[in-house]
Amino acid sequence: MEPQGDVEWGDDISDSELLDIQLDHFSSEEPPQPSTSKGDTSKGAVDESSITSSPSCHRTEEETEKGTTKTDEERGEKRKRNVQGGHSSLLRFMKRHLSVTQLCEQTWCEMKLDYGFRNPKVRKTEKQRTEVQAGANIHLARELEVQEVIPINTQTREDSFAIKLLNILHMIPMLEAGQCVRELPVFGLYEGVFIMGVIDELSYNQKGELVLNELKTRRQDTLPGDAQTVGHYFQVGLYKLLFDGLIRGKVRREHIVDHLKLRTSLALGAEVQAHAVKIGIQLATFGELVDAFLMILSCNEVPCIDLLQMEYRHQDSSFLIGMKMVPYDEVQLRAELQGYKAYWTGEREPRGVDIEEVWKCTMCPYEEICDWRKNRSHTPATLHTNKRIK
């Protein structure tokens, strides 16, 4: 049995889990939520391509929750229509894209993920836990070592995605020059689903190999157990799949425009256009930016990621607990992705943990309402009744 101390999925915090939490959680068809996408610069210099969209132009989180929360009956009916129709591009909860974080949460427990979308206030409370905030502070301190953040007002979803494209365009030359970059947005279409994420760090080692480093912070000064390691390995594997696809030119214009339902003819906001000029790109519309982005990627000289690495640090002291090199098997990764996708496309209902991992339920805020757990109540000797948030 997996040890039950310091093993909850949320205890390990990565930058990708801290960025765009609202944008990843709610429907992509809603007006844009406050998002953060950052560029990099040398320590002490001001980086004008480092961007943060301003929340002043967006609806409040409470308003978004009201617009996206539905009854179980309504949600169930929608799932059935998606499965029977077989042609809808919408995923569960009316989403048009998935984040790497959401897919990784499935490796821990799909029922917890599912209940989180149905209970956004509980999910928000989980994100505000002390250990989560402590991890965020460590990430922020490391981030500020190499970059500055400049606010940019975004009026539309096209503006918000344009920020991601501009940050990638800024970091490509840095990688070509052998420099370290952090908070690199990545995305791509795999298994028919558009996936987005944020790579913590890319740098070159002494052998000239491109290394992806993913930082996790932990409450205890011990390495994670196998249950958490599965999710961590899947996460960095997805990052490599997305990054390598980007620099190899596998992303197409229609992938971005059609799957995210973005308007190519829409003029970008004045601040977004002004920032584009600062990094050497003159354009007016979102479509022009997409075309420029794909053209620049088509002639880049950045190599594919050579090595995947996990870095674990203690939350209170920032002490290095240990490093782990992560093996990469693309065939296995794609097979796992295909299995997780079936939940989002409505081909199957969410699955709970196996009986061997029922100890996870004692740390879950949805323990008392979980149907999966109730259906397994015929084995009371392995179940616990610790109560948390209801």
Image (spheres, grey):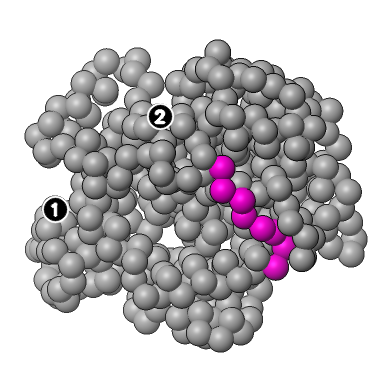
Write the residue at 67% across / 42% down: 167
Region rendered in magenta: 145-152
At label 1, the amino acid type is Asp
Chief SS of the magenta region: loop
Tally of numbered discs: 2
Write the residue at 16% across / 76% down: 386
* Numbered label attached to residue 388: none
Residue receiving disc 2:
96
* Residue 370 magenta-highlighted: no
Residue 187 in which image quadrant: top right
At label 2, the amino acid type is Arg
> Seen in the image, is 179 located left or right of residue 307?
right
> Seen in the image, is 196 located left or right of residue 368?
right
Instruction: For the C terminus, give its image quadrant.
Output: bottom left
> Seen in the image, is 295 located left or right of residue 198?
right
Q: Secondary structure at mark 1?
A: helix
Instruction: For the N terminus, give its image quadrant.
Output: bottom left
Asked if the residue under mark 1 is in contact with the one under mark 2, i.e. CB atoms within 8 Å, the reply is: no
| In the rendered image, the vertical position of residue 93 relative to residue 282, given as above or below | below
x then y, percent, for residue 13: 48, 66
Residue receiving disc 1:
371
User: Which badge, 2 or 1, comes first in the chain's sequence?
Assistant: 2
> Seen in the image, is 31 located left or right of residue 249?
left
* Residue 149 magenta-highlighted: yes
